[in-house]
Amino acid sequence: MSTKTVLITGTSSGIGLATAVAAAQSGWQVIATMRDTAKAGALLAAAEAAGVTVDVRTLDVTDPASVEACLAGLDRLDALVNNAGAGHLGTLERESVEDVRTVMEVNFFGVLHVTKAAMPLLRASKGRVLTVTSVGGVIGQPFNEAYCAAKFAVEGFMESLAPVAATAGVSVSVVEPGAVASEFVSNVGLADNALEQAGPYAPALSAYLDRTRGAFAHAQTPQDVAAQMVELLAAERPAFRVLTSDAARAFAGAKLKDLDGSAVQTLTGTWVA
């Protein structure tokens, strides 16, 4: 069987970088994409250390022309890993609607742009789509309104797409990590004077940040998530939903059995009290 090809978005750091290296080690031809290839140094160094090569290409998920240009150069694609995304902290009263739109463009519409462009190739290969979402796509979390809205949208979109894509031989999965020790947290755009800017919500934000620092002190590694991504790439019948840690499974499980929403509200309410 010829080598299979996977395209992975957001590979300059974190889960994307680790998945690109792990997939290459498993024999995949890896097209590792990122918005700014000047930031490919860490990926290329990791690939060299692992004794593998990856094909680094430019792809800005928020730019349809960039997406089309990247995908147009492919003759075959067996798998797509939608990983590119950006965190965001804020609350509605204290930020602009444009801030929220930006979060949606990166985390939701970016996924749609790439998946839409990839589908003809994936139909031809009977391939698969893996999309990294988050437990924040299952449970809404304080000060993550825009981010969780985007991830909820991705979850709903992929859950709806999955049975349709399956009729064309394409499998669809969502991967839901909890806390992951990567640069993602440092990229949420929280200003140094965020507490001052939070106004009446400053006490709640302070409590939330304290709680979050504790959660990320015991975070899962990107390499652990990547190992599970590679298993999904190889699985004969990949599951639709994959929670990547015991903590993620316990957290999401609270929502899945909470029919009236009271258990989740009680849980997340403690984060800002």
Image (cartoon, rainbow, N blue to C red):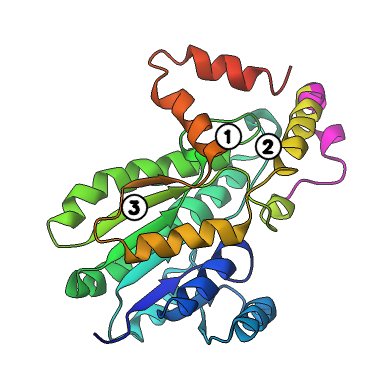
Percent coordinates x, y for residue 249 in the rendering: 48, 36
Residue 67 drawn in magenta: no
Give the mark nearer the N terminus: 1 vs 3. Answer: 1
Residue 90: assigned label = 2
Percent coordinates x, y for residue 257 in the rendering: 39, 21
Task: Name the quadrant of the N terminus.
Answer: bottom left
The three-letter code of the residue at mark 2 reads: Gly
**Residue assigned mark 1:** 145
User: What residue is at 49 percent from the left and 47 percent from the top?
Assistant: 244
Label 2 sits on a secondary structure element that is loop
**Do tag 1 and tag 3 residues touch (Cβ < 8 Å)?**
no
**Residue assigned mark 3:** 173
Label 3 sits on a secondary structure element that is strand
Q: CA distance from mark 1 to mark 3?
A: 24 Å
User: What residue is at 19 percent from the left and 48 percent from the top?
Assistant: 163
Percent coordinates x, y for residue 13 in the rendering: 64, 67
Q: Nearer the viewer, residue 103 or 43?
A: 43
